[in-house]
Amino acid sequence: MPVIDFSRPLGLQIAAPPEAPPAPHAIDAAPPDPREAFPGLVPESEPPVPPAAAELEPEPEVAPEPEVAPEPEVAPGSVASLGSVEPEVSERTGSRPTVLRIAAAIVTDADGRSLLVRKAGTTHFMQPGGKIEEGESAIETLARELAEEIGVQLDITTAEYLGLFRAVAANEEDTVVLAAVFAMAVDGEITASGEIEELLWVDDPDLDLDGVDVAPLTLDELLPLWERRRDQAFGF
């Protein structure tokens, strides 16, 4: 309500009340897109909704790996694989070698000497024994070969199996021998027969084999094994 000052002319005192401020207008614009307002913080799309448990396909069952049979044990000092002798043959011949399976015996007498034999038409000395024929076991092969080569009847109950040994063959080209080796003692006189042309009893390899051709299997594997066994048995 206007206030009237009677000390002043009336016409100068009555004035229109001040205008009220305009009412705010409603905002017609839509709220800002949160992806534009907060770039990098809001994902571009909604996260995928996982399917219901009933819709999930069961994972396929994985069959267990088959068990691998362990490699047969070999005696201490023997070669565990052909890897050590194959490169030597392959490098010399350029082809993968043939594997010849044989049975052989470290034959000793009462004095601990070791017997070596040389077959007719060859130059290398080696342990008695020979090729394992189809259907034969190693001990059967050894019994047959000993009877044919040196006239000895093998008592299989006293033969001691020493293990598998491998080396480059002495008399066959491109061949590696895989030998099942036994130890046995003999009494009495031993004579060469069949394909055996010469016998050699070894007491001191350095002296007895000086200038003698010896098969790699005998020289590298079986003679050292015989010496270790003799040292243990006789206390050398």
Image (cartoon, rainbow, N blue to C red):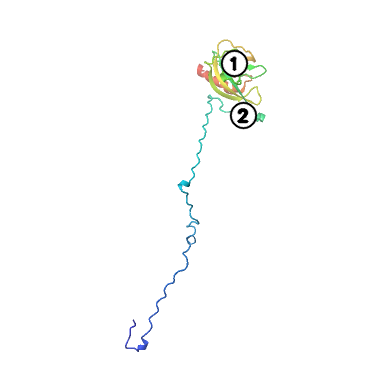
Residue 1 versus residue 215: which sits nearer the camera? 1
Q: Position of residue 23 (x, y in %)?
A: 41, 74
56 versus 190 height, above or below: below
Residue 75 place in picture, x, y as percent? 53, 24
Q: Quadrant of residue 156?
A: top right
Q: Dot 2 corresponds to which residue?
A: 86
Label 1: how many residues lie within 10 Å, few (<14), some (14-19) or many (20+)? some
Q: Which residue is under mark 1? A: 144
Element on which disc 1 rests: helix
Q: Most extreme residue toward the top, as rendered?
A: 188
Q: Secondary structure at mark 2?
A: helix
Instruction: Look at label 2 and name its amino acid.
Output: Glu
Q: Is residue 55 left or right of 9 when viewed as pictured?
A: right
Give the side of residue 32 with respect to residue 211, left or right: left
Q: State how far apart marks 2 and 1 are (Cα).
A: 29 Å
Please name the residue shown 54% across and 21% down the image: 162
Q: Nearer the viewer, mark 2 or mark 1?
A: 1
Q: Residue at x 56, y 24 (%)?
A: 164
Q: Quadrant of residue 114?
A: top right
Number of marks drawn: 2
The residue lying furthest to the front in this view is 54
Q: Residue furthest right?
A: 121
Residue furthest to the left: 6
Q: Position of residue 54 (x, y in %)?
A: 46, 46
Q: Position of residue 181 (x, y in %)?
A: 56, 20
What residue is at 63 percent from the left and 29 percent from the top? 88
Residue 118 in view in this figure: yes
- Report the front residue among 171 and 110: 171
